[in-house]
Image (cartoon, rainbow, N blue to C red):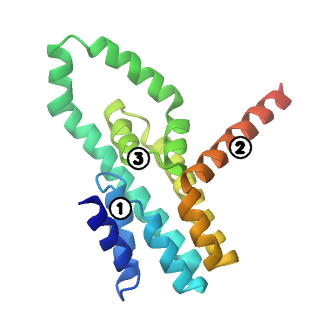
Amino acid sequence: MLRRLYDWTMAQAVTPHAMWTLAAVAFIESSVFPIPPDVLIIPMVLAARSRAWRIATLCTVASVIGGFFGYAIGLFLFEQVARPILSFYGYMDKFSTFQDLYNQWGAWIVFGAGITPFPYKVITIASGMTGLNPVVFGLASVAARGLRFFFIAWLLWKYGTPIRAFIERHLGKLAVIFFILLIGGFAALKLLAN
């Protein structure tokens, strides 16, 4: 089934409604859909390199809006489903500890999941469940999703077809390396400031 879903997503990249499909995929991928919008960005940018920035912008906006939908799922379903179960088993104290840790590091968690292959939907729902500040969630989401989608669009715009195979083979590794470098950069700045 996953393969059929992937094939369907790839086929949508060349239709006249590709931008609408991209927006829909980016939106629902942030809360429930298993296929990331990157699989549409790649063929769409390669087909029309002059539209790379428009494609990346649309994908970022739709993904962040979808992230807020995932946040709402976590926020509203937590009260109705998870809280009674946690209370029944006596785990609310442990969840409170988890919630405090999550909210302390929430911006980094959202940012990390937003640029890496880690399922962003898990983080959007967890952010709602823990009540992460929605402004923090939104800013981290815009930064992460924007960096990810604009980086892919830039690579495709700059290098064209040869980069496609490289990105598809190494997307996970590239995102993790970028995240490590980014965190390392922030840590270095913090050390230099002290």
Give the residue pinned by disc 1: 27
User: Which amino acid is tagged 1?
Assistant: Phe
How crowded is the residue under tag 1: few (<14 C-alpha within 10 Å), some, or many (20+)?
many
Give the residue pinned by disc 3: 119
Name which residue lies at 60% across and 45% down: 176
Q: Which one is nearer the viewer's eye here, 28 or 33?
A: 33
Query: Looking at the image, is mark 2 or mark 1 nearer the viewer?
Result: 2
Marking on residue 181: 2
| Relative height, residue 9 to residue 64 (above, below) | below
Q: From the image, which quarter does the N terminus lie in?
A: bottom left
**Percent of width and height locating residue 9:** 34, 71
In primary-sequence order, the first of circles 3 and 1 is 1
How crowded is the residue under tag 2: few (<14 C-alpha within 10 Å), some, or many (20+)?
few
> How far is the residue under mark 2 from the one under mark 1?
28 Å
Q: From the image, which quarter does the C terminus lie in?
A: top right
Name which residue lies at 60% across and 85% down: 50
| Relative height, residue 173 to residue 169 (above, below) | above
